[in-house]
Image (cartoon, coloured by chain):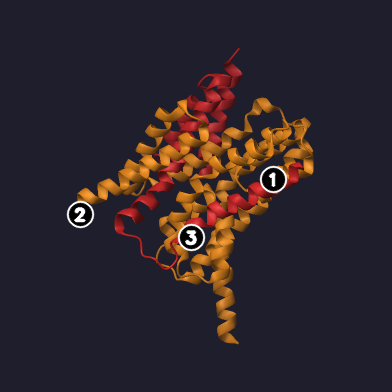
Chain colours: A orange, B red
Amino acid sequence: MAAATLRYARTAQAAATGARDMAPLLGGLVPFGMAIGVAIAASPLDHAVGWATGPVLFSGGSQLTAIELLGSGAGALSVVASLLVLNARFVLYSAALAPALDTQPTWFRWLAPYFIVDPVVAAASDPSTRGHDDAWWRWHYLGAAGTLWVAWTGAIAIGIAAGPAIDPALGLEFAAPLCLLALLARRLRDHASVLPALAGALAAMLALVVPTSLAVLLGMAAGSSVAAFTRRNES
Amino acid sequence: MSAFAVLAIAGVLTFAIRSSMVHVLHGHALNPALARACAAAIPAGLAAIIVVSLASRARDDGWTRAVAMLPALLVTRFTTQALLVVAVGMGAFWLLTAQLP
């Protein structure tokens, strides 16, 4: 009984820490979610389908693309193909989280990937999450991801409802890259991340002539290659 | 095909992408170089998304967002508190857009 209570307390504490780690990021992500809601309100797409892009795709960039293509009546194949290219970067995030998920229970290995998106991956791989046991990591992840999920889907709903009242000139979607900048800055405290980040930014800049989604993917590939190459030289 | 059906197919395939490597690599130890490369995908991806996001909006309003990001970048030298970084960046963006004709 006492052991179960203690386990429950540790679970709750880990989940609360995850939620607390995600909370500051919501200042940037909630306005972005609202901006997506405003885009849905302005689109000819059915509002329920537009809102459903949140829980179904759970990725701002993909959702904006889906809203634009579905709203303009694009063919199913072109919508699905565009989203697959845009989401291809999640393969690398999936590989990045694989070692941490390897020792987790099966149910969690199936559930956790649903939440794989930039802020959740960054929070889950933050240096502060190292040195804890599997259960703590699992509940911290769920606390962070669950907090983002609730805030994100709620912000989209608010954006749809308040759409006409929100001035697009406010540029709310700019809050998202600012939020990612804060996440990146935290990663750059670890010097091993500096070169990959620089390579990623440079490669994405050079690749701007290709579609946006490919530029991001090429940036990630460049950063990963630099990291692998640097390590080989060091060893 | 209805818009919701298309979205559902995209959602299932997106989940397959997200979970792919978690299951492919399950039970296999990554060699150190590959593990380092996978970990580096996160900062590289964040940097690439920021660059692409700024560049893709440059067509609409010049480089206002990129310029507004400079004070936010300066703030990250002292703190990585997301709320502060967002507040400074958004404030700079609104100031700049208010000055533009």
Identify the residue at image location x=31%, y=43%: A226
Residue A99 higher or lower than A177, as above or below: below
Q: Name the residue under label 3.
A: B22
Query: Residue A85's image quarter?
Result: top right
Which quadrant of the view contains residue A5?
Answer: bottom right
- The chain containing the residue under callout 1 comes to B
Contact between labelled residues 2 and 1, with CB atoms less than 8 Å apart? no
Find the distance from the CA under tag 3 to the CA under tag 2.
27 Å
Q: What residue would you read off at disc 1?
A: B7
Same chain under badges 1 and 3? The reply is yes
Amino acid at dot 2: Ser
Above or below residue A163? Residue A151 is below
SS category of the residue bearing label 3: helix
Looking at the image, can residue A157 be seen? no
**Image point (55%, 84%), residue name:** A3
Element type at mark 1: helix
Q: Can residue B49 be seen in this view?
A: yes
Horizontal side of A228 relative to A100 (left or right) equals: left
Q: In this view, does A99 lie above or below A133?
A: above
Mark 1 is surrounded, within 10 Å at the Cα level, by few (under 14), some (14 to 19) or many (20 or more) other residues, namely many
Q: Residue at x 47, y 42 (%)?
A: A182
Name the spot of residue B12 as percent of width and height, x first.
Answer: 63, 53
Label 2, on which residue? Answer: A235
Residue A178 percent location from the top left of the image: 52, 37
